[in-house]
Amino acid sequence: MMKSLNCNKFHSFRLLLAVFLLKESIQYVNAEIEADLVRPFLVRDIEAFGMTLPFSPITAIIMIVSFIILYRGMTKKSTAIASHILLDDTSEEAKKKLEKFKAEIGNDQTKFAKYAAMHSTCPSSKNGSPAGSLGQFTHGSMVPPFNDAVFSPKSKPGDIIGPIQTQFGWHLILLHEKDEQRQMIAG
């Protein structure tokens, strides 16, 4: 009799345990279903670095657009707008002449254009507007000494730079504008 009583207790315990586990699993499944119903359909979780992050198509689009903007910003070349007076003589006398012009001009852009029209040997002194204008150019498009002078961190828009010697002669440079981009990726 005792043996059958123990078997019945064992079976009833197993039955209670099964009911309890079934009830818990139903509650767990219901909780998951409710959680899925509350969240938008397209939002899914991604686990990264021990964190659970929500992810959706909009998140992907934002990440792609942000990457494109950052990449363009890091690879865009610096640009400048400048005018110059060129003396196609490489002697020290030409350098002294440009130093004299620089002292007479000061930082006056109109005087610079007049001096470029009167003294420069570059075709831009006749065709440029204002006289001596080189227009807009990118970093690396001019000869190295000219390029280094214009894109130097020391040179600011409105400054007269030089005299600078290149293979073409001596230059006096008026920097009109400089859009300096920090090139982090070679391109």
Image: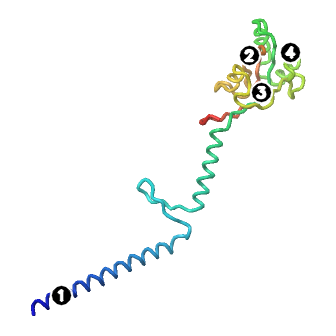
Report the amino acid beneath label 1.
Answer: Lys
Q: CA distance from mark 1 to mark 2?
A: 104 Å
Which residue shows up at 61% across the image and 50% down it?
Answer: 66
Residue occupied by mark 4: 119
User: Which comes sooner in the sequence, label 1 or label 4?
Assistant: 1
User: CB under 8 Å between callouts 1 and 4?
Assistant: no
Above-or-below relation of 183 to 62: above
Mark 3 is on which residue type?
Answer: Ala
Of pointers 3 and 4, the one earlier in the residue sequence: 3
Mark number, residue 82: 3
| Image quadrant in which the C terminus is located | top right
Which residue is denoted by mark 1 in the rendering?
9
Residue 126: x percent and y percent?
90, 23
Whether residue 105 sits left or right of residue 149 in the image: it is right
Observer-side mark, 3 or 2, equals 2
Q: Which residue is mark 2?
A: 166
Distance, label 3 to label 2, CA atoms, is 16 Å
Provide the secondary structure element on which disc 1 rests: helix
- Of the pair 94 and 145, the residue shown nearer to us: 145
Residue plotted at (67% across, 23% down): 148
Q: Disc 2 marks which amino acid?
A: Thr
Residue 76 quadrant: top right
Of the two numbered discs 1 and 3 on the same chain, state the one appearing first in sequence: 1
Q: Nearer the viewer, residue 44 or 135?
A: 44
Dot 2 alpha-carbon crowd within 10 angstroms: few under 14, some 14 to 19, many 20 or more: some
Q: Which mark is residue 131?
A: none
Q: Is residue 54 left or right of residue 24?
A: right
Q: CA distance from mark 2 to mark 4?
A: 17 Å
